[in-house]
Image (cartoon, coloured by chain):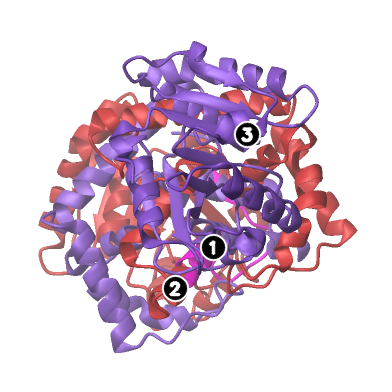
Chain colours: A purple, B red
């Protein structure tokens, strides 16, 4: 199998908002990108997307050798994927189309080529149904825009080979992504599960007249959303427990889980769950004690508040 | 009733992490702060908290006349609140204690003094049960740390006077907060409802072994969390719909609401709900079309990514 360090060329199959965003990301990280999309005016739309994104990517810093000229759009799917070691598939989010496209890609590529799908929710086990060789098919789920949001979630299907998942993770890391390797298939993966929990609660609240769209967005942007750009919900609550951290937080505020604060009921706070949360936070915190984490959070929040103020974006600010 | 512009002195009752954070905020905004807390070493802890926060507040910019010397800690509750127009109550989060303390505060203050409670979930109708005069009691729910996170949620109880809610909102706005005025009592208010939806889904996932604490935090920090510091979940999805915005997003991705992407079931996507979401997003977007919002989001994301990189905080980054 090819060393991910030697991969210099990537194919982007499907070049809409997500696929085009991937193309921009790979170009900025110094790859050659072969692009294919059967849509009318797809090539022009892709070029517009990348040219719009490029100044942003320049200001964040391009990889050595990165250039817009390393993009090549082709009308032939075979030409796009026939000679690359990594294919990012971002076709329409319809199961029948995904099945057909992934089967085609598996047949059109060499036996060492990884094919990663940007699907936002289908499992690879489902999507691989029509592929003869499903061993190289993985999910590589990004967040929009893929050239700015670092996260990619990687998981294989039942017929995916372990080496293919390893290879995809290693490649994405080298390509500058923040990789979560999932050990099992889960509808919505991890990020969308969490995001959808908020989204569904928000929809319920609007449906019931409990809050407006604007209040919901303001509540997140000027509230917990500012913290979440820095620290996830677990570490955030680790800090809410004072010096006692997550253990204190769960032991003292655990009863609040019974309160009807959202439509989603909480799980039973068993000793096992409590310990998993505490140990997870301690692993994340590493050698940083609570006071250090608080200082880090505050330093990060100040940096974010100033950045938003200077870039004239974001919600109502102090 | 006193013009909020003339309020120059605030009492902070209860000076733990939240109450002390409020004190730091009010001092930085140029108020005199009278503080009271019956805990052992409360005064020393408060001073430490404020001194730790102060350099951050200086770097964000202090209001004219703001000074650490304008803090006065007193052992007498009556002295703290007897002659101020605004009291921020941040006592322990226990209903019996809140009832007792709020009744005491209502009795100890003048008939124009607003008393705002930092409670994270109790309704003012419940908390005001023992107060003779409940007309001036409002919820003023902050997020931690109150001196950096702008959001405050304001709502009255059944016996609260409308003018008191108006007054609290006007005062908080002048004091530099981002105010959500809620029209009705709702368990968990708005921010905690949304935050708790994520938190409960996360607890379920850890309990079932679907994700680790670290994966959950990484998924948020390197994924949707970065966007949420800029744009709430509704406006984020308005941008996910391409040029068609929220209308396109709901019409095309609405069926995904039936998918088991989280444990919380979605509401029925009725025409009314669809229209409320679309109209809300259009109001929020104002004159900005989708392309302008995308540029604004990207500009904000770049500013945040750079700020986090420079302040050496946050998750794995590009």
The picture places residue A99, in percent across and down from the top left corner, at: 68, 56
Task: From this view, report whether residue A270 is shown above or below residue A291.
Answer: below
Residue under disc 2 on the same chain as residue under disc 3: no
Magenta segment: does it hold B182?
A: yes
Residue identifier under label 2: B205
Q: Residue A63 occupies which quadrant of the picture?
A: top left
Residue A296 visible at all = yes
Task: From this view, report whether residue B17 is shown above or below residue B64.
Answer: below
Spatial CA span between label 3 and label 1: 35 Å
Disc 2 vs disc 1: Cβ atoms closer than 8 Å? yes
Magenta segment: does it hold B174?
A: no
Spatial CA span between label 2 and label 3: 41 Å
- Secondary structure at badge 2 equals helix
Residue identifier under label 3: A78
Q: Which residues are magenta?
A: B179-201
Residue identifier under label 1: A193
Residue B15 visible at all = no
Disc on the earlier residue, 3 or 1: 3
- The subunit letter for the residue under badge 1 reads A
Of residues B163 and B259, which is closer to you in this image? Answer: B259
Of residues B91 and B295, which is closer to you in this image? Answer: B295
Q: Residues within 10 Å of mark 1 (few under 14, many from 20)?
A: many
């Amino acid at each position: 199998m090819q060393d991910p360090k030697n991969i210099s060329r990537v194919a982007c199959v499907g070049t809409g908002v997500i696929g085009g965003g991937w193309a921009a990301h790979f170009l900025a990280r110094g790859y050659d990108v072969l692009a294919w999309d059967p849509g009318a005016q797809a090539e022009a739309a892709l070029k517009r997307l990348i040219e719009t994104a490029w100044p942003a990517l320049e200001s964040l810093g391009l990889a050595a050798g990165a250039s817009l000229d390393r993009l090549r759009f082709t009308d032939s799917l075979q030409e796009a994927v026939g000679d690359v070691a990594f294919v990012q598939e971002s076709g329409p989010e319809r199961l029948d189309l995904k099945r057909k496209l992934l089967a085609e890609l598996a047949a059109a590529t060499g036996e060492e080529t990884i094919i990663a799908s940007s699907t936002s929710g289908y499992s690879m086990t489902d999507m691989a149904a029509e592929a003869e060789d499903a061993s190289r098919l993985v999910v590589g789920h990004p967040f929009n825009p893929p050239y700015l949001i670092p996260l990619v979630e990687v998981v294989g299907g039942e017929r995916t080979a372990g080496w293919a998942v390893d290879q995809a993770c290693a490649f994405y890391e080298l390509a500058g992504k923040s990789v979560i390797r999932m050990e099992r298939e889960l509808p919505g993966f991890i990020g969308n599960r969490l995001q959808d929990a908020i989204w569904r609660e928000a929809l319920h609240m609007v449906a019931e007249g409990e809050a407006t769209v604007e209040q919901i967005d303001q509540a997140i942007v000027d509230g917990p959303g500012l913290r979440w750009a820095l620290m996830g919900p677990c570490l955030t609550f680790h800090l809410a427990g004072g010096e006692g951290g997550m253990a204190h937080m769960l032991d003292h505020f655990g009863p609040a889980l019974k309160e009807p604060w959202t439509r989603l009921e909480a799980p039973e706070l068993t000793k096992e769950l409590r310990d998993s949360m505490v140990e997870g936070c301690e692993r994340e915190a590493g050698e940083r004690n609570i006071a250090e984490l608080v200082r880090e959070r505050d330093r990060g929040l100040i940096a974010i508040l100033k950045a938003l103020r200077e870039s004239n974006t974001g919600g109502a600010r102090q």
